[in-house]
């Protein structure tokens, strides 16, 4: 059987970049922010760190070690110019998807009410 990818993971890079647009964060803080701010969105920590690693390889985020807090050093990530460009591209893609999904929802609602959908 083929392992299905979690649907929310498709947009995980977009949400990580969006969180970093607010300011530098370490991986755990990104995970916490996403879990608290987005209902029914529960990315696993491994996926967040894999995505951060890929974003860093792609030049969309940069990192540095933060040794100012007590305990072990934490890798803090920040958005780069390339990250801002990618975030803008995600916005365009998500707007397009929302338009398509809104069409589905309005057509479905019209059909359920017995009204012919507008074309």
Image: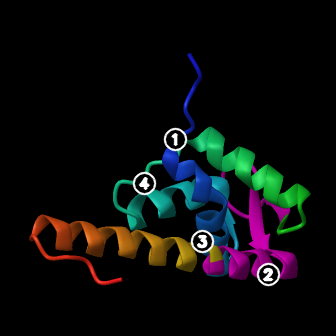
Calculate the distance from the C-alpha at mark 4 to the C-alpha at mark 2: 24 Å
Structural distance between the alpha carbons of marks 1 and 2: 25 Å
The residue carrying mark 2 is 85
Q: Which sits earlier in the primary sequence, circle 3 or circle 4?
A: 3
Residue stretch rendered in magenta on the structure: 63-92
Q: Position of residue 82 (x, y in %)?
A: 86, 77
Image quarter where the C terminus lies is: bottom left
Q: Earlier in the sequence, mark 1 or mark 4?
A: 1
Residue drawn at (64%, 43%) of the image: 47
- Foreground residue, 9 or 78? 9
Indicate which label's residue lies in the foreground, 3 or 2: 2
Residue topped by disc 3: 19
x and y, in percent, of residue 99 in the image = 46, 78
Q: Quote the CA–CA distance across marks 3 and 2.
A: 15 Å
Residue 66 within the magenta-colored segment of the rendering: yes
N-terminal of the pair, mark 3 or mark 2, is 3
Dot 3 lies on which element?
helix
Q: Which residue is mark 4?
A: 41
Disc 1 or 3, which lies upstream in sequence? 1
Tell which tag, 1 or 3, sits nearer the viewer: 1
Is 47 included in the stretch rendered in magenta?
A: no
Tag count: 4
Question: Do the numbered discs 1 and 2 sit on residues whose CB atoms are within 8 Å?
Answer: no
What's the distance in space between the residues labelled 3 and 4, CA to CA?
14 Å
* Marks 3, 4: nearer the viewer: 4
| Discs 1, 4 touching: Cβ within 8 Å | no
Contact (Cβ within 8 Å) of mark 3 with mark 4: no
Q: Dot 3: few (<14), some (14–19), or many (≥20) neighbours within 10 Å?
A: many
Tell me if residue 103 comes above or below residue 3 in the rendering: below
Task: Identify the residue at image location x=57%, y=60%.
Answer: 29
Question: Mark 1 highlights which residue?
Answer: 6
Q: Earlier in the sequence, mark 4 or mark 2?
A: 4
């Amino acid at each position: 059987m083929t392992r299905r990818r979690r649907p929310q993971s498709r947009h995980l890079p977009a949400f990580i970049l969006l969180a970093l647009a607010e300011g530098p964060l370490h991986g755990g803080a990104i995970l916490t922010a996403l879990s608290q701010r987005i209902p029914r969105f529960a990315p696993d920590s491994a996926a967040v760190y894999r995505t951060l690693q890929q974003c860093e390889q792609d030049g969309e985020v940069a990192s540095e070690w933060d040794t100012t807090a007590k305990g072990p050093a934490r890798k803090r990530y920040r958005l780069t110019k390339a990250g801002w460009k990618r975030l803008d591209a995600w916005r365009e893609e998500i707007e397009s998807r929302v338009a398509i999904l809104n069409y589905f929802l309005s057509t479905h609602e019209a059909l359920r009410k017995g009204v012919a959908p507008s074309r």
